[in-house]
Each structure stands twice: as structure tokens, then as C-alpha cells.
Image (cartoon, rainbow, N blue to C red):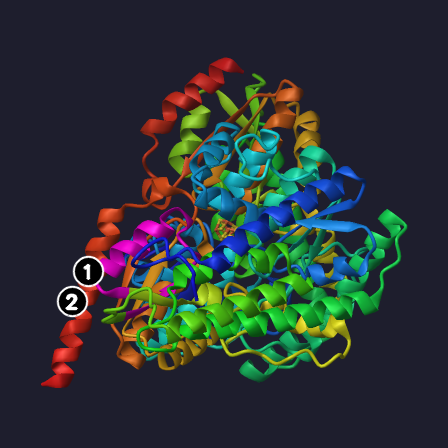
Amino acid sequence: MFVSKLSDSIRQLKQKGFRVVGCFPLYPTVELLHSLGVIPIVLWDLKDQVRSLEESDCHIQGFACSVARRLAGFVLSDEGALLDGILMYNACDTLRNMPEIIQLGLEEKGRDLPLFRIHVPMAPRDQTGSDDYFAAGIRELVRGIESAFDVRFSPERFLESVKLYNAMRSLAVELEALAAAGRVSYGLFSRVIRDGYFLPVEEQILALEEAVRQASSVKARDDDGRGIIVTGILPPPEAVCAALEHAGLRVVGNDVASQARSYGRPAAETGDPVACYSDFYRNHMPCTTLLYTSDGRVRAIHDLIRERNARGLVFIGEKFCDCEYLEMPFIGKTLSALDVPDLQLEIAADDADNVESLRTRIEAFAELL
Amino acid sequence: MTEKRETSKGFTKTESGKRLTRMLTDDYMNLHRGAGEGAFVVWVAIIVPVEIFRGFDNVVFAVPESHAALSAAKGVGMLQCEKAESSGYSMDICSYARIDIGTAMSGGKDSPTFGLPRPHLLVSNNNNCSLLVKWFDVYHREWSVPHFIIDVPFCYERQKDRDRAYIVAQYRDLIRTIEAMTGQKWDAGRTREAVHNSSEAARQYKRFIDCAVSRPSGITAFDSFVQMAPLLTSRGSPELASHFRMLADETEVRMKSGLFPVPGERYRLFWDNIAPWHQLRKMSTRLADLDANIIAASYTSCVGSVEGSYEFLQDYDDGDPLEALARMQNFSVCPYGMELRFEAMSWAARHYGIDGFVFASNRSCKVYSIMQMDLQKRVAGTLGIPSVMIDVDHADVRKYSEENAFVRMEALLESIDAVRSRKGA
Ligand code: SF4
Ligand code: SF4
């Protein structure tokens, strides 16, 4: 199999004696795992890590999104065998079907992995009494991880982990601002953020600090570029990022699930995981998958466009992601009313590198702006 | 029995079929009339327990999924899909959603029921799928209509008490929401009565689909697909229970008179996915010509059951109606995982004497379809029953090729023959 950053990173962690848990996207409870001495690796944006979908194609039809197909492909691969467990929550329709598919795939290979699950309530807090339900789920999750790895939860260590992840988040915000100022390309920014998901948070922080340091030493571009906001589940593939920049477009902000939606708000700094994650999910950056927040997404995109002085929005459609595709027409309509043009690009599992068909549309869009 | 049969083989139009048409017409007329006279209109997802609304004086409900299925069966599915697509909704989105959005955005034009009256409240649940929540959100935003989401944990194992209590708490919130919006008071007694009616209707519907146990089968799954519609639009009413009672009675009488949809039945098949609404007659007739009958389906077998089982749960015992409804919140196929689904399918294979499984891989409904490849392996490996996977979109005929589907289904029949000759050898 193709050797990737992801497998390299896991291999190194294992050599150092760490236990590594592969987390399903989008917003897993990484702080909790970290505080229990387990390294969480979030398994998304794997297009450069999992080149072949052969493994996944034995289990999942081609009309699942590439996120799910690559995730399954990785966990079932030889490299995936290095993982010590899997953690998932009810992020979307496709992902909820995955644990049993993966377990069966592992069984076929004579492997077995502990699976940790949590149900994140998807109804607004003022509507239902979901707090107790969620609290019980978090406590069960803690007990499950404790017993699988023979570790003990500590509120102090949890708080430490939350602070570390928050430090990482604020560095990501800083780097995003540097990208918006044209001091680092959006493609490079995206790579740093993406690779961070495959690293322990301490190394992620070092990588971000280094990227911030390097970008800060670059002079800000004095042309204002044609600022755009990018939205979607994943950032565009690198070749599309390059095409955007080549067309004179500058990404001045993003509403990408693996980027700003993930690092945009810090987690509450408390030693109590129930309080922390109640706040984390309830007050999350709006996301199409957190059903009760997605009303706020329209407003969040409008605010972002205004604050960053963007001239247009580019939607990076993850093919077969129903959640996103059901939201975009309305968002597009509200933008038309504001005279903000939008461009909808679709990225499928098989054409991540095929930008030629998209280039013309990107250039036409740039001219329109 | 003097009933006139309108086809000789396959899916048949019976007296019950005619009564069904009348019932559905009445349901939609009453809905429009109620809305016109000022009733509070709720749009619901199919597994939202509408028995709750029957506890109010003047609340009517519409079921967009059922309307979409009807539109597809009446041949206007593609037209409505195209309307949604021209408004920017991707062709990859569930065809029910596209049909409904196309219908709603064109003010009900081309709908067999003149569309649905505008809602005052949208009520969805996320355990069948969260796509539906996003679909209802379209109206919530376009029309500024409140949207109540019932959050139901997906079942990898049987429903836990904690989950049930959580669901009941949300039903109570829903009741409070409607009371606050309408000024009407919810009457638990009327909901209790509706739960009795639904339980009896499910029992009778089970009697009807169990006519497939006989050899040859007394029904095709296509009959049961068609008869599902009032389960959604008339749920909780006494008329529904009596309709299904008569349906089961009539079917049993027909069988006693030697009337079977595929009299020379040689292949008893099981369908896994939503009904192919645009193909009901064509598919059943063509299969009947091959002496094959899809006698049962996961889509219909789940009625009146709970996760992991197709057996009738039990008659309602007059306990807390909200508890009883919460227990049934996972009855349909999508809210539970592969392990439970396989358990239910294994039971069906024994109960109905299934010779082959048809997995309808449906790109419109990912929740139903993503896991079928492994289910298929388990059906072969554990049950030793041949199966086939065909591509079918339940409501968008453009994503279906009859020729491809039949090449595969004929291959399935050959595999069944091969298994038989091996066993005979
Ligand atoms: S891309 Fe969409 S469908 Fe795929 S895993 Fe993410 S949220 Fe789910
Ligand atoms: S995706 Fe499937 S479960 Fe959801 S509304 Fe469509 S057909 Fe129904």
C-alpha cells in the first residue's frame, strides 16, 4: 500500500509506545482520549493517504462519499491494523452505518478493535431535555475507554488536554488570518491543518507554530486579491487550491468542516468532560451535520463574507454528501439576494486530481468577481 | 367471492385495492378540507408517531414521503425531480426529497393530490435518516415554518430503557409545542385510542403479509407495498384497522378459492429496500412470467415490529401511550444496524421459505443501502441462500435499467436452480 503521512505518523507513535485511536469525523471527543493517554487521529481528508479504494469497494457501494470510503479503506488496510481502537459518534447517515461494516471487515481479516461510540443529541437544547441523556453517554464513554486501555480518568489531565487543543485551535485561527492576508497560500495552510489531524496535539502545535513563524516573515500582499470564502466538508484538493490562486482568487476565510468549523471556537476549559462537551456540541460553529446548529450557518456565512470583505463564495461539494447538498441551494439564494456570486464545484472520490474540468469554471468565476 | 381480477399474474387489483384508493382519496381530501377550514397542519416524517396528533381537536398531518411515493407510482416522480434539480438540488439527493421539493416549490402543480397544504409545523426524526431533517429544513427556511426534530439514537443493539425515556421526553416537548402554538389541549385518552387502532392495524397488516407463508404465496410483495400507503396517511384511525382486517380476510378467501398471484410459483424471493414505485406492475408481471415471486420485503415486514425483528411485537396493553409509541420508534428498517437487520432477515428466510434475496442497491437511500454488500455476504455465508444486487432508485426512474435488473434477477433464478440440483444430487 501507498505509504502516507498518516501511516508514518501512526507507526512512529506506536514505536514510541503510544496507543492510537482512529476517530471518525467530524468533531470527535479528542481531548478526552488525549487526557487518557491515548492519541486520537481523526480520519478525514485522506485523499493523499488512501489512494486505492479496493478495500472499501468490497464493502461499500460507490455512492458513499469519499470520506467514508477512504476511512473504511484505511481502517481495513494493513496500516489500519496499527490502530488500537475506533471512536465514532452519529455525525451523519453514512457514518452511522460504518462501524458494523468495519467490524465485519476486520473480522474477515481476523482482526478486532475496540469501538467507542457516543450519541450526540441532535435537537436544540431548549426543545428537549437531552442534557442528562448526553451526560450519561459521556460517562459511559469515559468508562469504556478506561476499561479498554486500563487507564484512569483525571479531571486535571482533562483540563490540560482541553487547554492544549485550544492552543492548537487558536494557532490555526492565526494561520488562517495569515493565509487571508496572502502570506501563506491556502493550499499550504490546508496541508498544515490536514496533517495536524494525523499528529499528537503537541506536535500539531509545533507544526502550526512553525507555519505561523514562516508565514509571518513573508510580506503581506498589497493587492487585495479577489477575496473569496470557501465552504464545504473538506478543503479543495491542492490542485484546485492552486487553480483558485492562479485565477487571482484569495481565500480570505473558510467555512470548511475540517477547518474553521473545527477550530473556530475553543472548548470550555473545565475538568468536567460532561460540561465541556455539552458546551462544545451545543455552541459549536454551525455545521450542516449538527442538525440544530445549521440554521446559524446561513448567518455565519453572511457574517464571514461581510467581515472579510469577500466578493464570492466557493462551495466545495463532497459528492454524495446529502447534508451539504440540501443546504447549498438556499444559501446560494440568500447570497444572490445580497449580490454575492457563488460557484459550486463538485469533488468525487475518483477525480480529486482532475482539475482541468474545474479550471475553466474557476477562471470564469474569477472574471465575474 | 365475486371479485374481478384485473391481471392474470403478478400484482393484482382487488376489491381491497379499490377500497384502498377510496381511503387514500379521502385522506388527502380530508387533509385539504381540514387545512382549508383552519386546522393546524403538521408535516411529518413517516415514523413520527402521528397518534400524538390524534390527541388534539383540530390538528391534521401530511406525510411528504408518502406523497412522493404516490407521485412516483403515478408516473410524475421524474417531472417533480427535475423541478427540484432546476432549483439547484443535486440529482444525488434522495428522490423522495427531490419529488417533494419539486412539488412544494411549484405550488403542488402536477401532483396527484394537488400537493399538500402548507404546514404550520414540521416534525422530523433523525433515526430513519438525517437527510429528511435537512429536507424539512428547506421548508423551515424557505417558508419560516418551525421545525421540531425528534432526536432518536440509532440502534446497534435493542432499544435501551434510557433511549426510550429520552424519546418520551421529546414527545412531551412536542405536545407542549403544539399546545402552545394552537391553544388546544392534548388528550392522552384519544392518543391511547389511536395507539390501540394502530396496534390492531399492524396486527391485521401482518396477517395480510403472512399470506406469503403459503405455497404458492397468496400475495406478492408488490401488493404489500401498495397497501402501505394508508399506514402512513391513516395511522391511528379505526378505519385503517378495519381496512386491513378486510384485506387479510379477502386475501385468505382468495387463497382458499385457489387464486394465487403466481400459481406456478417456483422461486420465492425476498426484496431488501424501498419499493421500486415506478416499476410495481412491470416488475411483478415480468417476474411472474418467470414463475418467480417476490413474496416479502424488509420494507413491509418491519411494520408492527421492533428493531431486529419482523415478528409482531404485541397488542397494545393500554399502558402509557407515549411509552408504547417510543418503543415502536425504531420499527422501520433504517433506524437499526446490520446485526439486527441480519437477524430479522434470517427469521424472514425461515418463516417465508425464501429461495433468493434481491438486494436493491438504491443510491437515493444511502441509509438503507450502505451495508447491503456485507448483508449479501452474510446471506450467502451464513444462510447459504443465493442473492443478487440490482441498482434501483425507488422513485427516480432515470436511475433504473430494467434490462440490467432482469439480467441479474434471471441469473439469480439460475443460481437457485443450481443450488436445488446440488441438493438433489
Ligand atoms: S462528507 Fe458528508 S456524508 Fe460524507 S462523512 Fe462527511 S458529512 Fe457524512
Ligand atoms: S434517504 Fe431513505 S430513509 Fe431518508 S427520506 Fe430518502 S428514502 Fe427515506
The residue shown at (69%, 46%) is B30
Ligand 2 closer than 8 Å to label 1 CB: no
Question: Which disc is residue B414 wearing?
Answer: 2
Can residue B51 be seen here? The reply is yes
Q: In this picture, which residue range is highlighted in magenta?
A: B268-292
> In the rendered view, would you say B280 is above or below B325?
above
Percent position (x, y) of residue A133? 73, 70
Q: Does the CB distance between marks 2 and 1 fall below 8 Å?
A: yes
Q: Residue at x 68, y 54 (%)?
A: A166
Q: Is residue B34 above or below residue A363?
A: below
Q: Residue at 58% x, 70% y: name it.
A: B202
**Mark 2: which secondary structure?**
helix
x and y, in percent, of residue B281 in the image: 35, 51
Queried whether the magenta region covers residue A327, the answer comes back as no
Quarter of the rendering containing residue A165:
bottom right
The chain carrying label 2 is B
Residue A261 shown left or right of residue B257 in the figure: right
Dividing the picture into quadrants, the one containing residue B78 is top left
Q: Residues within 10 Å of mark 2 (few under 14, many from 20)?
A: few
Residue A281: x %, y % from top left: 69, 56
Q: Is residue B226 left or right of residue A300?
A: left
